[in-house]
Image: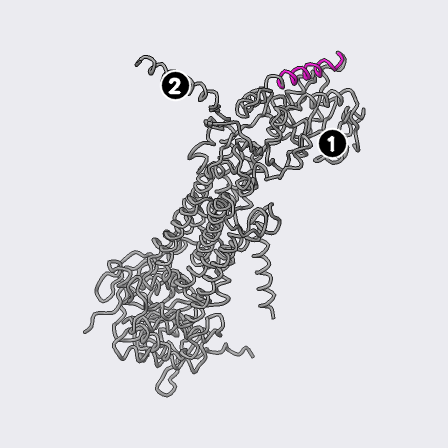
Amino acid sequence: MSARGTVTAALALTVASLLLVMLGLCVGSAGWEPLTFAHESASAIVWEIRLPRTLGAWLAGALLALAGAVAQGLFRNPLADPYLLGSATGASLGVAVFLVGLGLWPGLAVGWALRWGMTGAAFVGAMGAVLITVALARGVQHTLRLLLAGVIVGMVLGALAALVMFHVPEVMRALQSFMLGTTAFIGWEAVHLMALGLALTGLVAWGLGRNLDALSLGESTAASLGVALGPVRMALVVTLALATGIAVAQVGLIAFIGLVAPHLVRSFARPTHRGLLPLSAATGGVLLLSADVIARWALAPQELPVGALTAVLGGGYLLWLMHRRSW
Amino acid sequence: MKAPAIQAQALRVARGGREVIPGLDLTVPAGCWTSIVGPNGAGKTTLLQALACLLPSQGRVLWQGREASRLSARERARQVAWLGQGEGGGEDLCAHDLVMLARLPHQAWLASPSATDLVAVQDAMRLTGSWEWRERSLGQLSGGERQRVLLARALAVQAPVLMMDEPLAHVDPPHQADWLALVRTHVRTGGTALTVLHELNLALQADTMLILQQGRVMHQGACADPATHRALERVFEQRIAVHAVGAHWVALPVPAADPG
Amino acid sequence: MAERVWRGWAMRLVLLALTGAGASHAVTLTDDRGARLTLTAPPQRIVSLLPSLTETVCALGACERLVAVDTHSNWPQAVRALPAVGGMDDAQVESILALRPDLVLAATSTRALARLESLGLKVLALEPRTLEDFRRVVGQLDRALGTSGGPALLQGVDAELAAAATALTSAQRGTRVYFEVSSAPYAASETSFIGQLLARVGAANVVPGALGPFPKLNPEFIVRADPQVVMISDRTSGDLSARPGWSGLRALREGRVCRFTPAQSDVLVRPGPRMAEGARLMVACIQGRIPAGRS
């Protein structure tokens, strides 16, 4: 009962999140720029641009970290990440196809198709990839088969995306920028969508928290404790796919957050999944928001690709962790 | 006469395309401890898993006269406590949380542990001597300590039937004795125990022994019965001999004949 | 009496209508996406996110109305002093909003299009890819900006193109050219804008249009086609003779390889008002006046 550790962690993460949000409101195209609403467009900049993308970064990080914690519990593998079932390459393929369509029919760049075209295509691609994986593994009965199917689907869809890029090289640059990840295009609608997604997937995952704990004991033991393996696994896969799909559609492919957040939580508390899931989400939010603020600040007005930054930071952390454990 | 705890009728189990158990009838009496023994590959683990309804099988498995497959998963979880062989995992949970998982079949979906649950967990952990390290995670414990936590988990379910597959892996002799006492207490208070053990000496301390060979029941009888001892020696091709030591029976390997 | 009052009112109404008509310059445009945009007055603060559009705006005489351009816009000299706010993939939404533009010119494939529109900015999406596109864009910009230099500009460009078209001697006409856009190799075929310019000056393109505007070719194709002249951008290519089989190319043996400088490449790839200069560069290359650099 490491309740004390859990509560401390929750408090620390809340404080960190609030501080980072305030920081995010002050970092803009000119670097450190706490706007004082002196001129009219200042209010628009802070409320319409900085606040939604700051909140969006936190929400996307939370979604990815939640998906990562679910993946690690479902597959009983500490190296599992949210993209295991092929959602990353599925989203890339979806965006590639959309960009090609946009080139062929510029009329797609209007109205709702413009607004939701790219994010919609990414989301459909991600969910479609998971669907194909589950179909390939013939259901969710065998975890190993699911993992293998995920790897295969990931590779095949990645190859298809590469073929699309080859055939229509004009989309290469746009696809690359999508894949590197950015929060620059997040508005209030995206924030509402991600908040809704987080609430939904978070609730379902939390409700299944004890089942995830039981699963960690092994499948026979979990079944002997009354866990309905099939339905529980399916629910977890759907939650994983949804959370990942929603996040990837809005911010692109951000590496490491889903992988690292649960481990970070475990390094300062030892909660069961009921505590691990919300703490992981909060940690993921803090991680991605920090990376986003750095990405906006370091070379303002240019923006570093946030996905590359999280990979560097996440990799650095893992290296440090390995170094510490070896002593 | 109490209804038998577990009955199998025409049980057939196939694994990986091969029929491991080609048709078996057996009765496990209630209120006593039955140990399942047999040479490697006899199908002991498969049989135990099939009796616990953890494997798909053909034929009927009856628990106290009722068809087990007709019960809900929760009811089944409350009837039989299962301890599997080599089922690791749960490395990141602290011992107390892990044992608390045993109370899952008794808890409502979103409820937090009740007082009953906490008492059950504490009792089980004290019985297995693992209460002192309840805050440590499994990854920090030795093999024997870990096994005792897992045993506590099985006990905390407080189910009338205990099914254990090689429960004494890595456990040292003093704690093996504790485990024996545990099982005896469980049986004395009306429970049933069904264990797969490869340590024949401990298996011979049970009430009844079930000898399995190539998926068939070769013999089922009291452990004190000489017929059982002979059947045991036969199944191991006379490479072991059963001797009386004080009030108990032990099986010792027969040394190979000296060539010189 | 009543008649005089009525006539007074009628006069006032007519005056109102006349002044109203003169003052309202409401222009409705349809951009390349098919979206309709209404401008009530000629825009005075313009952000351009495509270099060819920047050049066209300046050529129409509205250069001083630009408040920001994209990172690649570099002509005329005046726009280099303007703040650069990103490009097609990384337009800096916040910087653009802070400048309070009343018109944003972007390509149809600019990623920030939706975001800028949702923030209430007026966005005109134009993406000229061919000579005909350029003509259309000039007309639309002329209407949008309220300038009238469009027809003159087009006439001037046509005249210069015609002049460039006659520059090649009859012996030089039909010279077979290979234009490489980037090392992979990606070539410019007949259907691309570059291909159209080549056709105008009277050269022949070894890459047929059926392969698409910028096909990625097997280098063997170029060896077999054996072009007489190779046009290449200095930025992306390496040592041409190092490519297998290329040292035997006629163009390399005769030293007819033109390496365009970045400034020259910019002129060649943008369907803008400097296209005639691009045509002249091609003519210069065919006539052997562009240095080969290292090859």
Name the spot of residue A232 as percent of width and height, x first. Answer: 35, 55
Sequence order check: which comes first, mark 2 or mark 1?
2
Same-chain status of marks 2 and 1: yes
Helix, strand or loop under label 1? loop
Local SS, label 2:
helix
Kind of residue at disc 1:
Thr
Residue C266: in magenta span: no
Q: Is residue A144 above or below residue C62?
A: below
Q: Which of the 4 image quadrants contains residue C154?
A: top right
Q: Are marks 2 and 1 in contact (CB under 8 Å)?
A: no
Image: magenta residue range: C153-169
Q: Nearer the viewer, residue A81 or B85?
A: A81
Q: Quadrant of the C terminus of chain C?
A: top right
Query: Residue B221, labelled with which disc?
Result: none
Q: Which mark is residue C261?
A: 1
Q: Say which of marks 2 and 1 sits in front.
A: 2
Residue C261 location, x and y as percent? Answer: 74, 32
- Indicate whether A41 appears above or below C73: below
The extreme bottom residue here reads B246
Residue at x 41%, y 78% (from the top left corner): B130
**Left-right relation of A139 to A96:** left
Asked whether residue C162 is drawn in magenta, I would say yes
Residue topped by disc 2: C13
Counting every numbered tag in the picture gives: 2
Is residue C27 in view from this perspective? no
Visual colour scheme: one colour
In the foreground, C62 or C117: C62
Res A244 visible: yes
What kind of residue is marked 2? Answer: Leu
CA gap between label 2 and label 1 equals: 62 Å
Q: Residue furthest front?
A: C1
Q: Residue C139 or B48: which is nearer the viewer? A: C139
